[in-house]
Image: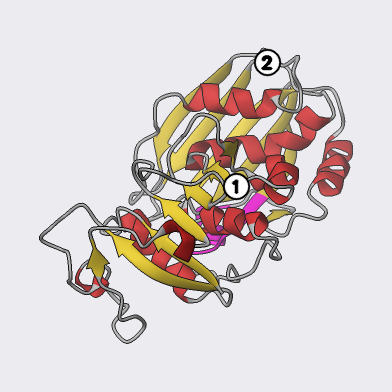
């Protein structure tokens, strides 16, 4: 079993991680740490509802010895003395760690990396469906992006356009186009839906073929024949993608659950890769009705 700990364990993000890991066949959560002395010693169910009967874990203010852990999920700051050889997955950006977008960086994640951080939900939703175009050197600007987020999702973080650009340039270093993002609030509860208009003269059928080749062995990103909606992905670990024609180019659409594929389930996905597991292990999550 992979013995894991979660920091900032009182937060909603930690709660979502815990729910996934309790149902992961290869993981045992051994510690849930918090900086709150008020919570120390109390059951984690005091903060994370719906887990009564599923776990006896209690909050603690300190981590176990690192040699008793196989992985740690860093929800806030890097713990002091974190070993270089301990698998660590952060939910915030950390310089020098691998960018944890599996559709982009699966090779480094499975070839010896130990530390990775999870992209923002918005960058995941926008960049992922554009990766096949970047891999075939087809991107040029400007990219006009619309991001619609559900009522339960957070606001668009600062630096999103720069993060997306960096991810795309990892495959197409020549891309220097402007990324223009329009933000909207969706009328659904949770989920991130994006559309990106890309100047392109290549036929949609060819783009679709290239994308199917690119994502062919990725188990959590799927191409669909219609524009994906938030309800298609709510409570799942999937990214659904569609390519269609628009004026002067291609319209690239995608939908993810920003709280899962955009955060918690992507962290578990990355942990699976870092530990050499099948990437979808523990992530067969049913869609909401």
Disc 1 designates what residue? 114
The label nearer to you, 2 versus 1, is: 1
Disc 2 designates what residue? 141
Q: Secondary structure at mark 2?
A: loop
Which region shows up in magenta? 229-240
- Give coordinates of residue 116: x percent, y percent: 56, 43
Disc nearer the start of the sequence (2/1): 1
Q: Quadrant of residue 208?
A: top right
> Do the numbered discs 2 and 1 sit on residues whose CB atoms are within 8 Å?
no
Which class describes the residues within 10 Å of circle 2: few (<14), some (14-19), or many (20+)?
A: some
**Distance CA(mark 2)–CA(mark 1):** 35 Å
Pick out the residue farthest to the bottom: 53
Is residue 17 one of those drawn in magenta?
no
Which class describes the residues within 10 Å of circle 1: few (<14), some (14-19), or many (20+)?
A: many
* Image side of residue 187 versus residue 127, left or right: left
The residue nearer to you, when weighing 266 against 29, is: 29
């Amino acid at each position: 079993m992979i013995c894991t700990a979660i920091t900032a364990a009182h937060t909603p993000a930690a709660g979502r991680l815990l729910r996934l890991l309790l149902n992961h066949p290869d993981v045992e959560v051994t510690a849930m740490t918090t900086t709150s002395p008020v919570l120390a010693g109390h059951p984690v169910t005091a903060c994370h509802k719906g887990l009564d009967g599923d776990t006896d874990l209690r909050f603690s203010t300190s981590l176990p010895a690192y040699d008793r852990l196989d992985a740690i999920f860093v929800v806030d700051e890097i713990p002091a003395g974190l070993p270089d050889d301990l698998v660590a997955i952060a939910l915030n950006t950390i310089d020098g760690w691998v960018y944890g977008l599996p559709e982009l960086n699966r090779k480094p994640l499975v070839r010896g990396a130990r530390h990775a951080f999870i992209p923002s939900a918005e960058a995941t939703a926008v960049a992922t469906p554009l990766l096949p175009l970047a891999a075939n050197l087809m991107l040029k600007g400007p990219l006009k992006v619309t991001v619609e987020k559900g009522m339960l999702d957070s606001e668009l973080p600062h630096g999103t356009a720069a993060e997306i650009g960096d991810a795309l340039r990892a495959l197409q270093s020549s891309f220097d186009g402007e990324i223009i993002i329009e933000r909207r609030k969706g009328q659904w509860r949770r989920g991130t839906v994006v559309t990106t208009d890309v100047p392109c003269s290549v036929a949609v059928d060819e783009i679709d073929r290239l994308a199917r080749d690119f994502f062919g062995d990725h188990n959590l990103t799927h191409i669909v024949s219609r524009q994906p909606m938030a309800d298609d992905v709510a409570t799942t670990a999937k990214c659904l993608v569609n390519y269609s024609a628009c004026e002067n180019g291609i319209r690239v659409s995608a939908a993810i659950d920003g709280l899962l594929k955009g955060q918690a389930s992507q962290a578990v996905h990355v942990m699976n890769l870092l530990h050499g597991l099948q990437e979808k292990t523990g992530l067969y999550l049913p869609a909401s009705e």
